[in-house]
Amino acid sequence: MPRRINDDERLRRLEAITDATLSRLDVSDLLDELLDRVRDLLDVDTAAILLLDVHAQQLVATAAKGLEEEVRAGFRVAVGHGFAGRVAATRAPVRLTDVTGEDVLHPILVEKGIRSLLGVPIIAGGDLVGVLHVGTLSRRSFGDDDVRLLELAADRAGTAGRIRSAKMEQAAALALQRSLLPARLPEAPGVEMAARYVPGHVVGIGGDWYDVFLLPSGWLGVVIGDVSGHGLASAVVMGRIRSALRAYALICDDPAAALTLLDRKVRHFEAGSLTTALYAMISPDRTRIVISSAGHLMPVLAEPGREACLVSFPVDPPLGIGRAAGARRNATLEFPPGGILLCYTDGLVERRDRVIDVGVHRLINSVRAAPAETVCVTVMADAGVEQPTDDVALLAVRRQS
C-alpha cells in the first residue's frame, strides 16, 4: 500500500527540493545532491537521471545514487525501449510494483535486485530533457504523493540539464574555435603579422574568423570574415566556409574568383547563413595586394609618413544573399615598405549607442605604420573592447622594409 504523507512531511519534501542553495551548486554537484535528497525523502534505494541525446534519440546515464555503475559504463537506452525509454516515449510517470527482466534493459537493475520502480520524464520548455527514476529493493506501490515529489525534482533537474547542455555546447564551440583560428600565424618572408580574437557573447564563440596561408605560387592569402549569428551553429558554418575558401584559393588566380565559388557554395549548402568576407592576396615580392570584398568592411592602410586611410575599392554583395551577385571584382593596391594592412570585423567599430562611421573614424586615427603587434595592441586599447557586445576579429599585416 502507498505510504500516507501528512502535511508536515509534504512541506519538508517541498522545501528540500526547492531549496535555493541547490542553485548555487555546479550542475554535476546539483544533480548529485538532488538525487541524495530524493533517495532520502522517498526512502528508496536507487535514484538515477538519464539525459536525452537528441541526435541519437537515446537516454544517457548522467548521475546516479545506488546505480553508479550505469554512469561509469555510459549506459544508453533508446527512447521507447526498457523502463526509462518507456517513460521518455510516453512523457508520463510510470510505476512498476513488480519489476521483471522484461521491464528493464540494463542488467545492473536485475543484479541489484530492484523490485519496484517509479520514473517521471524531465521536461524543460516543453522539450524532453531526460528521465528521473527511483527504485527499491523491497516490493513497493508508489503513491500519488511520491509521483508529485519526483515530478518536482524532475523540474529542478530539467533546469540543470539545460544548463549542462548549454555548457557542453559552449565547450564544443570553444574547441572548434580554437581548432579553426590559427594558434600561431604562419611565418612568411617579407611580412610580419599579428591578430586578435575576442568573443562578444556568453557562449564565447561566434562566426568571426581570420586566416592566413601561403599559396604554392608564393602569394600570401589573407582572409577575414563574419558569419551571421553566434554559438556553435555559427562556428560550424564558419569552419566549413573557411575550409572551402582555402580549397578555392588553390585553384583560383585571384580573390574575386575564389569568392565567386564560395558564394555558390554558401547559397547552395549554407542557405540562410549570411556571410561577409574579405580576401586579399599579397604578391610574392610583397609590393602589391589584390583584394576583393563580399560585403565586408574596408580595411585600413597605413604607410610611413602618411596618415592612415580606408582602402577605397568596390565592395560586392555578401555571400549567401539568395541570388547570384554577378561578376565579383578585384582591386589592386600598392603595398609600400613599412606599410600595414589592417583587417577587422564590425564588432571592433560598431556600438549600439553610436553609428558605425564614428567607430571607423576612431579606428583610422589609431592606426600607424608600426610593427603589427604594436598596432594590434593600440587598436584594441583605443577601441575599448574589454566587454564587447559582439565578436571582434583583427588581423594586421605589415610589409617589412
Image (tube, rainbow, N blue to C red):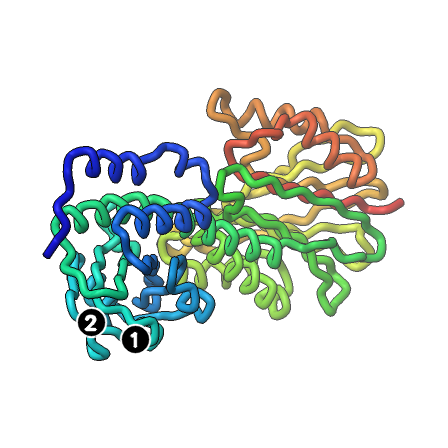
Check the picture and name the quadrant holding the C terminus. top right
Q: Is residue 332 left or right of residue 357?
A: right
The residue tagged 2 is 99
Q: Is residue 129 visible?
A: yes
- Circle 2 sits in a helix, a strand or a loop, which is it? loop
Q: Is residue 228 visible?
A: no
Q: In this rendering, is residue 281 above or below 101?
A: above
Residue 110 badge: 1
Q: Is residue 9 left or right of residue 243?
A: left
Of 158 and 99, the residue lying toward us:
99
Q: In this rendering, is residue 118 above or below 276?
A: below
Of 202 and 326, the residue lying toward us:
202
Q: Position of residue 166 (x, y in %)?
A: 42, 48
Q: Is residue 323 left or right of residue 151?
A: right
Give the residue type at disc 2. Val
Q: Residue at x 71, y 46 (%)?
A: 333
Tell me which corner region of the image, top left, top right, bottom left or bottom right, holds residue 187. bottom right
Q: Position of residue 365 (x, y in %)?
A: 70, 24
Mark 1 is surrounded, within 10 Å at the Cα level, by few (under 14), some (14 to 19) or many (20 or more) other residues, namely some
